[in-house]
Amino acid sequence: MRIGIIGFGNMGSAIVDGLIEKKLFKKKEILVFDINKEKIKNLPFNIKKNNREVVEDSDVVIIAVKPKDAENVLEEIKDNLTPEKILISIMAGIKIKKIEKIIDKKVPLIRIMPNLNVKVKAGIIIWCSNKYGKKYENIVKKIFSPIGILFKMSENKFDTITAISGSGPGFLFYIAEEFKKICIEKGISKKIADDLVTYLFYGTGKMLLDTKIEIEKLKEMVSSPGGTTLAGLSIFEKMGFGRILREVIEAAENRSRELSES
Ligand SMILES: NC(=O)c1ccc[n+]([C@@H]2O[C@H](COP(=O)([O-])OP(=O)(O)OC[C@H]3O[C@@H](n4cnc5c(N)ncnc54)[C@H](OP(=O)(O)O)[C@@H]3O)[C@@H](O)[C@H]2O)c1
């Protein structure tokens, strides 16, 4: 199987890193084109002259350009698509219906929504497909499982998931930043504050992942009666942190809906 990547930016290169690390494809089976020649200079892959060539010679094609370039690229490659080639789009907010309208062909089509954390191979990747793409679940898993956990989801959940997993790292970075500011205000050096907060998030994530104990139970474990955690958590409750977070998620969800409808 040969895999083509159109757009070798953050996401395109992260996907290829995963494939190479897991030795799923040989370098010559990875076909790449990016309009920005700097991005593909000296790459050890099969570099193509244009997007049409990528599609022509690939069995699976991943479009990893920005959403604003979607129409250009789809118009350019549509004549080279066939029902035997699988088209995968990772472009945020570009719906399957829109892609189908542009390419105007019955081809297997997969839509993927990865998050930033695929860069460290711990991403969340949600996906859906058109009716021709349904049978290719194994291929989707093969390509994307090296960089994260996959969830198949109907397309109408994509805006919600975009708010949670797509914007989620940004929201957690915000909380991390606030923790860091507090450390510094309380006289802890910037360097120690950085490491402290990084390990706070890393260790807490690892507890969730490694212990497999339910989230609610873990919270209970650190909240002994009369203790410091409970004293702090009572402020979250009093100030309505749950309500704030709901509003945060809803704002991101609404924005995602606006962008995908524009
Ligand atoms: N980054 C994330 O965390 C994230 C998360 C979820 C989804 N996504 C989606 O992933 C896609 C890629 O994002 P990214 O962050 O990887 O973007 P990126 O780093 O800007 O990479 C896109 C690459 O495609 C190139 N390109 C533009 N037009 C092209 C064309 N006609 N043919 C071939 N290459 C072309 C760009 O070149 P120029 O720089 O010269 O334009 C750039 O090198 C986006 O659609 C985004 O919505 C990203």
Image: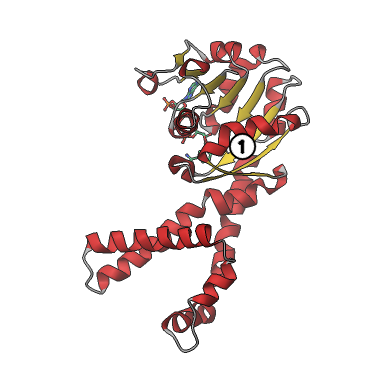
- Decide: is 45 above or below 242: above
- In the displayed structure, does residue 137 sit left or right of residue 259? right
Which residue occupies the foreground of this view, 159 or 72? 159
- In the displayed structure, does residue 226 sit left or right of residue 91? left
- Where is residue 176? Give x, y as percent: 39, 61
Whether residue 240 is visible = no
Q: Residue furthest right?
A: 131
Q: Residue at x 48, y 76 (%)?
A: 222
Which residue occupies the foreground of this view, 210 or 166? 210
Which element is circle 1 on? strand
Quadrant including the N terminus: top right
- Decide: is 59 above or below 221: above
- Where is residue 126? Give x, y as percent: 62, 43
- Decide: is 246 above or below 111: below
Mark 1 CB near ligand 1 (8 Å cut): yes
Q: Residue at x 50, y 29 (%)?
A: 19
- Where is residue 76? Give x, y as percent: 59, 15
Label 1 sits on residue: 112
- Type of the residue with mark 1: Ile
Which residue occupies the foreground of this view, 2 or 81? 2
Which residue occupies the foreground of this view, 230 or 154? 230
Whether residue 128 is visible = yes
- Where is residue 160? Give x, y as percent: 64, 52
Quadrant including the C terminus: top right
Q: Residue furthest bottom?
A: 226
